[in-house]
Image (cartoon, rainbow, N blue to C red):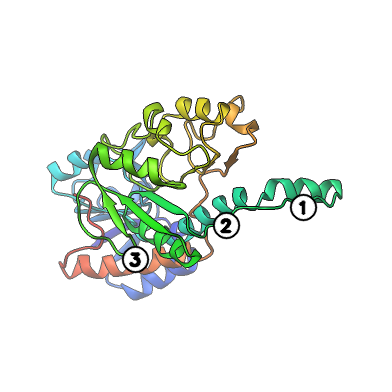
Amino acid sequence: MKIYIKPESIGKENYEKLKNEFNNIEFVNEKEKSYTADALIVSPEFFNKTNLDSFQNLKWVQDLMAGYNTLDINYFNTRGITVTNARDIFSISIAEDVISKILYFNRDLKHYMKSMTEKVWKPISRERELTDSIFGIIGTGSIGKEVAKRIRAFGVKKIIGYRNHQVPVDYFDEIYTEKEGLETLLKESDYVIVAVPLNTFTLNLIGKEEISHMKKDALLINVARGEIIDQNALIEALKNKQIRGAGLDVMVPEPLNIDSPLWEMDNVFITPHNASSSPFMKDRLYEMVKENISRFISEKDLLYIIQ
């Protein structure tokens, strides 16, 4: 059995551990040697310039990212190739990033950073607390649940989730579905968190009409994909102070154009698609990869199969 994986994707030490753990598997890290591989453990970018028809032995693809909107899942299904993603690997760090963006606004961190550089002692009274606020989380998967789990510790009033199907989800007080449910979530929430995968259903899910339903003092945080929010509608809403602000880890395009007005808005906090950053990321990827390889060679169900 042959598996293609780049050492740097999980860390060189972890790569060596993987080879020792499965010494009956041939691991290759050069693309020219990968075409006879039974499995590919790669990031989605691998497929941008790769003709998958060249991989005649391929049975499994492990996506090392959570997002898979750039992959042609129908193609893999047609060929009988199983595709898995890294669904739970980045959720903790992204959830913490959500909280950091909220506190950036609530505790006026931009003001205090500026005050430090100017050596000015200028406190702001009556800064916001999360206590008794309502949180709306669009997407109740691993990221949404990790956000809800942590937010509850702040003594919030209610946590609302939005998803395709009406089922109970841990850490959520209510689950809404359909267009009417999304509208209700937007109207009720003091904080709206976008944590849903990008697909044909969620493309431009939040547009001008949806933003108009939000409270004037609400924050919008996007740690999913930029295309889920109509960026032009968001810019107009921020210019007109329709909402309090937006914390954005994802935008369109990426990197964001230098002439985008988002860069200079006081009510916007931008990070460069880096919410998943963590010193534990590669170790978590290694543990997941190790488990899935073990399942693959034992012909057991793999973790995080994409249908």
Residue type marked 3: Met
Q: Is mark 2 on a helix, strand or loop?
A: loop
Tell us which disc is closer to us: 3 or 1: 1
Q: Say which amino acid is labelled 1.
A: Pro
**Residue 288, labelled with which disc?**
3
First in sequence, mark 3 or 1: give its number: 1
Can you see residue 243? yes
**Residue in view at x 48 percent, y 40 percent:** 250
Q: Which mark is residue 296?
A: none
- Please tell me in which quadrant of the rendered image residue 230 appears: top left
Q: Distance between the residues labelled 3 and 1?
A: 46 Å
x%, y% of residue 172? 33, 60
Please, what secondary structure does the residue beneath circle 1 have? loop
Q: Which of marks 2 and 3 is in front?
A: 2
Residue 226 on image: x %, y %: 43, 36
- Location of residue 185 in the rendering, given as x and y in whole percent from the top left corner: 35, 44
Q: Closest to the observer: 258 or 186?
A: 186
Tell me how far mark 2 sits from mark 3, CA to CA: 37 Å
Q: Please give the residue where the numbered disc 2 appears in the rendered image.
A: 129
Query: Which dot marks residue 123?
Result: 1
Specify the quadrant that holds the N terminus: bottom left
Q: Within 10 Å of the Cα at label 2, are there few (<14), some (14-19), or many (20+) other Cα atoms?
A: few
Asked whether the residues under the numbered discs 1 and 2 touch, taking CB atoms below 8 Å apart as contact, a structural biologist would say no
What kind of residue is marked 2? Glu
User: Is residue 297 depicted above or below 118 in this figure?
Assistant: below
10 Å crowding of disc 3: few (<14), some (14-19), many (20+): many
